[in-house]
Image: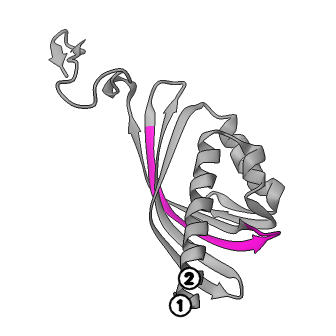
Amino acid sequence: MDQALLKRLEVFHAAAELMHRYQALVDAKDVDGLACLVTDDVELVRVQGNRKGREAFLDLYREFAASDVELAQHMLTNLQVSPLGGERYQVDACFWVITTHRTGEARQVWGRYRNDIVQADGEWRIAAKRISVTGIAIVPEDALVPADVTSFGPLPRRVTTTEHGGERVR
């Protein structure tokens, strides 16, 4: 196999594994685990403001861990890896996450990541993380069905009373 192709495949695989580990650790609210995935001088870029350095980066995930999110499930797609020069690579991807909250609702959030990754001490790490949220949708509690309901076939029907005393079937 061509050495250049082999290198591209190795980096692509490493980037995919790193991004999936990142998302699993965020979902688990594992801030200590996230600390192992980033460089000391990691940059975080979001519309809410930029942060620089491992502790500043981790502060975002400490905030997430302390939030009212009960469950988070991130998904990643459309992964692309491009060399930036030297041993630095840009990793672009789309993400989608659904979160459930103590207040009862769920949220869907989607957008794009643009990360820079490097090898440090033999491990691939995130050197820059740019999170661009494209949209957020709220799923009201009354639109959610219990988790033990089958995902196929008829769904349970709910009858609710309208403000005028009538009934509405969902």
Q: Which mark, by number, is residue 2?
A: 1
Q: Is residue 80 magenta?
A: no
- Give the main secondary structure, helix, strand or loop, of the magenta stretch: strand
Residue drawn at x 20%, y 17% is 157
- Percent coordinates x, y for residue 154 in the rendering: 17, 24
Task: Name the outermost residue toward the front.
Answer: 1
**Marks 2 and 1, how far apart at CA:** 6 Å
- Percent coordinates x, y for residue 95 in the rendering: 47, 57
Determine contact: label 2, label 1, CB under 8 Å. yes
Q: Nearer the viewer, residue 17 or 106?
A: 17
Mark 1: secondary structure: loop
Which residue does the numbered mark 2 point to in the structure image? 6
- Specify the segment rendered in magenta: 107-123
In this view, 89 is above or below 94: below
Q: Nearer the viewer, residue 170 or 22?
A: 22
In the rendered view of the protein, which quadrant contains the C terminus? top left
Instruction: Using residue 169 as the reference point, say whether residue 89 is left or right of it.
Output: right
- Give the amino acid type for the residue marked by disc 1 in the picture: Asp
